[in-house]
Amino acid sequence: MKPLKVAILGATGAVGQEFLKLLDERSFPLTELKLLSSARSAGTKISFRGKEITVEEAGEQSFDGIDLVLSSAGGSISRKLVPAAVKAGALVVDNTSAFRMDPEVPLVVPEINPEDIARHKGIIANPNCSTIIMLVPLYPLHQISPIKRIIVSTYQAASGAGHIAMEELRIQSGEILAGQKPAVKVFPHQIAFNLFSHNTTIDEQGYCEEEVKMVRETKKIFHDDSIQVVPTTIRVPVFRAHSEAIVVEQADEVTVEQAREALSKAPGIKIVDDRIKNHFPMPIEAENQDDVLVGRLRKDLSAPRSLALFVSGDQIRKGAALNAVQIAEKWLADR
Amino acid sequence: MKPLKVAILGATGAVGQEFLKLLDERSFPLTELKLLSSARSAGTKISFRGKEITVEEAGEQSFDGIDLVLSSAGGSISRKLVPAAVKAGALVVDNTSAFRMDPEVPLVVPEINPEDIARHKGIIANPNCSTIIMLVPLYPLHQISPIKRIIVSTYQAASGAGHIAMEELRIQSGEILAGQKPAVKVFPHQIAFNLFSHNTTIDEQGYCEEEVKMVRETKKIFHDDSIQVVPTTIRVPVFRAHSEAIVVEQADEVTVEQAREALSKAPGIKIVDDRIKNHFPMPIEAENQDDVLVGRLRKDLSAPRSLALFVSGDQIRKGAALNAVQIAEKWLADR
C-alpha cells in the first residue's frame, strides 16, 4: 500500500474532532497525520492512535507532501488555504460552502453520486449538513420515480454552529433552570427552551443562506436543475442531530410499500417507523450513528404522487465528518 | 347587567389556571365563580379577585344555576359532565376534542367564524391548539384567495400535555445537565434536548390524532371540505408556545405584499418579520401574548400560487384558554 499523508484543517473544531474519531474507528489507512488550526488553537496536543500530535498553525506552506486534506475550518479559511493545498498536490475534501457551487468542483454524497468523485480537479466539496441528511433518504425514492418538489422543515441542532454553540445551549439551559436570565453570545437569540429561524443572511426573496444551500445543492447532487426545494430552516434546542419533516412530490405515484422496500435496501439508512409503539426518528437516537433514521413514512393524502416522512441524522457525523471521510475512502479505493 | 354565574371545569390544570388569569385580566363580567376539578384536586384553595375559592369535586350536580362553563378537564370528563351542564341550562365552551366534530356543535375561532356561535345548542367547541395557531394567520390569506392546500410542520411545546409535562421538561433538563440519566414519565420519550413525533395514536394511513385534528378542524372552521391539510406534528423542548412552518397553496396568486397588508390589518396577529435583524417569530416571544406572531413571509419559489410563513403562538393562551374566553365574550355580547 502506498503511504498516505493526511492533514486535518480545523482539527480542534467539532467536525475536526469527529474526523479524528472516524479515522481511528474506520482504520483509515494513513501513514502520517498532520493537525492544522488557527494560531489560537495551535500548540494544542491531541492523541491519535496512542501518539501525541501537536496542532500546528495552518498556512499556505502547511501542505508540502500531504496527499489528502480533510478541511473544516470555515469558508474564508478554505478560500485562502485550499488552493495552496491543491497546488501542493493534495486532494482536498472541503466541508465548507466555499467551493460547493463551483462547476469545476464535484459535490458528493457517496450513497448518491460517487461517480462524480473521479472528475475532481483537486477539490471535492462536502454538502451542507441539512442537505445530506435530507438527500440520503430521498435518493432511493428518486430512483423509483424522479423527485419533482421537496417541501422541508428542519429541526436543526446547535452543533451546526460548532462546539461553542452546543456549550451555549448547555449554559443557557442551566441559567434558565436556576431562574437566571440566560446570556446570549454565540447565537443571536436564546437557544435554550426556544427555537428560531436559521441565523444566516436572508436574501431578497426571503430565504436564508441555509435554505438557499438546500435548494442549490440538491439540484447539483441529483444532476437535475428542475427539482424544486421549498425549505424552512429552524434551529432547535437539541445538541447534535438534525431532524427534518419532508413532503416529497414525484413524477409517478409511489406507494408506501415501494418506498419502504427501497429505503430498507439503501445504504446509510435505518428505518425507525413503529406506529404501534409510536417510535420514530429522534435526535437522541440519531446521535453518534452513521445512518440517517427514517420514519413517519406515509402518503400525502392531498396528492397521489406525494409522500411524507420524518428523518433524523447526526449533524457532525453524516452531516459533515463521516460524509467527507466516506468521500476520501471512495477516492482512495480508485487511487 | 344580568348576573352571570361561571364555572371552570378543570380549574387546577394549566388551561384552568389560565382561564382564571384571563377572566381577571379581561374584567370578565361574572357575578359568581365556581371552580371544579377531579376528587384529587378538590379542596385546593385558589384566590380570585381577592377572594379565596375552594375547588369542588365536579359531578353531574355541579351545574345548578350556572350560566357558563369553561371546560378543560379532558375528553372523557367532558363526555360525561358536559351534557349535565347543558341540561342544567348552561352554555359550555369546551376545550377538549369530545364534541369538536359533532355537526350539532359549532367549532369556533372568534377571528374566523364568530357567526357560528349563534347556532349553538348548549355546547361550543374550542379547536385544537395547533389548529387555532395555524388558522388565525391563514384566515386573512384565505379571504384574499381561497386556500386549497396547507403543508404544515409543527414545533409543539410541552404545555400541550399540561403542567406535569412542562415540569418533566424542566426536571429532565436538570438531570441531563447534571450528567444523570433523565427519568421518562409523562411523555413516552425524553423531551429535554430531544424532539419526537406527537405521541397520539397513529391511524391506518400513518397520521397521528393531532394531525387528523388539524385536517378535520380546518375544514369545519373554514366551512370548506375541499381544503387539504398535510401536517407533521412534532413535540419540541419548549415550554409553552407552539410554532409552525407553513406552506399554503391558494386558488390565485397572492403577492407577499398583499399577504402582509392583509395580515397587518387582521385581528389576533402580530407581524414579526425583520429580515435585516433576522428577527422572526420565536416561542419565547409568543409566550403570554394574546397575538399569534407571524413572519418569514415569502413566495414559495416552486409554485406561483403558494406562500411560505412561520408562526408562533402561546399554546395555553390563544391555543386554548384565551380562544375559549373570546368565544364566551362574543356569546355574552349577544346574550
Image (cartoon, coloured by chain):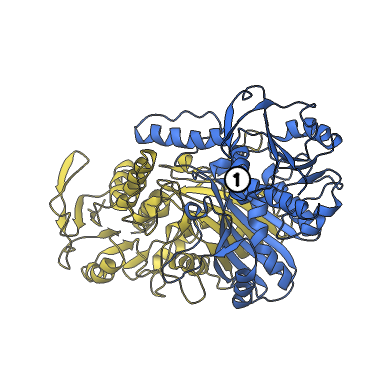
Chain colours: A blue, B yellow
Q: Chain of mark 1?
A: A
Q: Classify 10 Å Cα crowding around label 1: few (below 14), some (14-19), many (20 and above).
A: some
Task: Report the front residue among A276 and A265.
Answer: A265
Which element type, helix, strand or loop, lies under badge 1?
helix
Task: Report the front residue among B238 and B138.
Answer: B238
The percent coordinates of residue A304 (x first, y second) are 65, 75
Q: Name which residue type carries label 1.
A: Asp
Task: Report the front residue among B2 and B87.
Answer: B87
Residue in the image at 17% along x and 54% along y: B41
Q: Image quadrant of residue A295?
A: bottom right
Question: Is there any visible trace of residue B271 in the rendered image?
Answer: no
The percent coordinates of residue A145 (x first, y second) are 73, 72
The percent coordinates of residue A225 (x first, y second) are 81, 58
Task: Report the front residue among A118 and B42.
Answer: A118
Q: Quadrant of the C terminus of chain B?
A: bottom left
Query: In the displayed structure, does residue A24 sit left or right of residue B74?
Result: right
Question: Is there any visible trace of residue A24 in the rendered image?
Answer: yes
Residue in the image at 46% along x and 57% along y: B196
Give the residue pinned by disc 1. A24
* Placement of A270 over or under B258, stated as above or below: below
The percent coordinates of residue A308 (x first, y second) are 59, 66
Residue in the image at 37% along x and 54% along y: B333
Q: How many marks?
A: 1
* Placement of A251 over or under B32, stated as above or below: below
Query: In the displayed structure, does residue B86 sit left or right of residue A198?
Result: left
